[in-house]
Image (tube, rainbow, N blue to C red):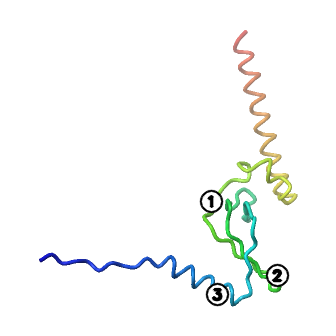
Amino acid sequence: MRRKLPVKAKTTHADDKKLMGALKRLGMQEIPGVEEVHMFKDDDESCLYFRSPRVDASVQSNTYVVRGSGQDKKISELMPGIKPCLSDAQRAKVEGEEEKDEDEAAAEGIESFEDTD
């Protein structure tokens, strides 16, 4: 006779219930309609990007919980839509990179123009 392996129960549903219970005890309420969340890192070059996350908040304790799959993205990849959300230092850094790219493109254009003569 063949020996059967015990079936392990999936715990994701149970974990979600525990998480929801803990959030409820903290007075968290879900905020509907959040399309995206950007969490800026200290290096001023990248951010953690969430597309259509679940967001819970407790206004009294100034606490927010963002649930979903996050991606590491460079700030320059999210431009220009993210520009109003940037600090002055981040905006200056990104604009400096854009100017470098434009200068390099212009220099390449001049070199290729000289090559055609």
Mark 3 — residue? 22
Looking at the rendering, in which quadrant would you find the C terminus?
top right
Tell me residue 57's x, y (percent): 76, 78
- Please give the label number shown on residue 97: none
Q: Residue furthest left?
A: 1
Residue named by callout 2: 59
Measuring 75% from the left and 38% from the top, which residue is drawn there? 101
- Identify the residue at the far top of this view: 117
Q: Nearer the viewer, residue 40 or 38?
A: 38
Residue closest to the eye, 110 or 11: 11
Picture quarter containing residue 40?
Answer: bottom right
Q: Amino acid at mark 2?
A: Val
Image position of 92 (left or right of 39): right
Q: Residues within 10 Å of mark 2 (few under 14, many from 20)?
A: few
Q: Is residue 28 left or right of residue 96?
A: left
The reply to whether dot 2 and dot 3 touch (C-beta < 8 Å) is: no
Q: Which kind of residue does numbered mark 1 sit on?
A: Gln
Q: Which mark is residue 71?
A: 1
Q: Earlier in the sequence, mark 1 or mark 3?
A: 3
**Mark 1 and mark 3: span between their CA atoms?**
26 Å
Amino acid on which disc 3 is placed:
Ala
> What distance separates the C-alpha of mark 2 from that of mark 3?
16 Å
Tell which of 37 and 19 is nearer to you.
19
Mark 2 vs 3, N-terminal side? 3
Q: Is residue 5 above or below residue 85?
A: below
Name the residue furthest bottom.
25
